[in-house]
Image (spheres, rainbow, N blue to C red):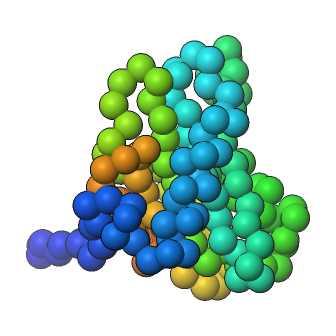
Amino acid sequence: MRKEKFQFDYEVYESAEELADGDRNLLSMAREITTKAYAPYSKFHVGAVALLKNGQTVSGTNQENASYPVGICAERVLLASAAMLFSDVPIQTMAVTYHNLLGDSSKPVSPCGMCRQSLSEYQERQKEPMRIILSGMEGKVFVLNNARLLLPLSFGSEDLR
């Protein structure tokens, strides 16, 4: 038996003002798009905006349903839209943020497990790293240079071969 350790590096910014212009603009767009979320039950509005390699942007918001399993997260709405609208164009950077109408929105959000799997597989499919910016409506911002970092020991297409 041996022990192994999984760890990764990510950037921490005290606020969005410290980000490079492009990242700050993308995060600002994600914060703004939270107003389009349909979250009447949780009041937890999530917005995601991605910059594609061709310069286009794609966005998504969470869409809840009274039957909770029927809802879909902002990240997967965005990935589905990008896959349909720009099927061969890689996502360079995705900003994900939230506005919690019932509480605090000042710490970075982190994608759920299903979204982590989807992000990991989408990145595998596009064969290029996807940067991820995680934030709330204010406060610290986390930047990961590779979406696969969100899901260590992931299950993917290689496991099905």
Is residue 72 shown left or right of residue 111? right
112 left or right, relative to 72 = left
Q: Nearer the viewer, residue 152 or 63?
A: 63
Q: Residue at x 64, y 45 (%)?
A: 33
Residue extending furthest left?
2
| Residue 121 location (% of width, % of height) | 61, 67
Q: Position of residue 66 (x, y in %)?
A: 67, 14
Task: Decide which of 54, 71 is in the foreground and name it.
Answer: 54
Residue 135: x and y in percent read 41, 53
Quarter of the rendering occupied by the N terminus: bottom left
Q: Is residue 72 visible?
A: no
Residue at horizontal 32 percent and vertical 59 percent from the top: 15
Which residue does the image show at 34% across and 70% down from the upper left? 18
| Residue 134, quarter of picture | bottom left
Q: Position of residue 123 (x, y in %)?
A: 61, 74
Up/down of 24 relative to 118, above or below: below
Label count reads 0
Q: In which quadrant of the rendered view does residue 78 lie?
A: bottom right
Foreground pick, 125 / 156: 125
Quarter of the image where one finds residue 104: top left
Question: Residue lying furthest right in this view?
Answer: 85
Q: Is residue 50 visible?
A: yes
Tell me if 59 is positioned left or right of 136 in this view.
Answer: right
Image quadrant in which the C terminus is located: bottom right
Name the residue: 54% across, 48% down: 31
In-front residue for pair 99/67? 99
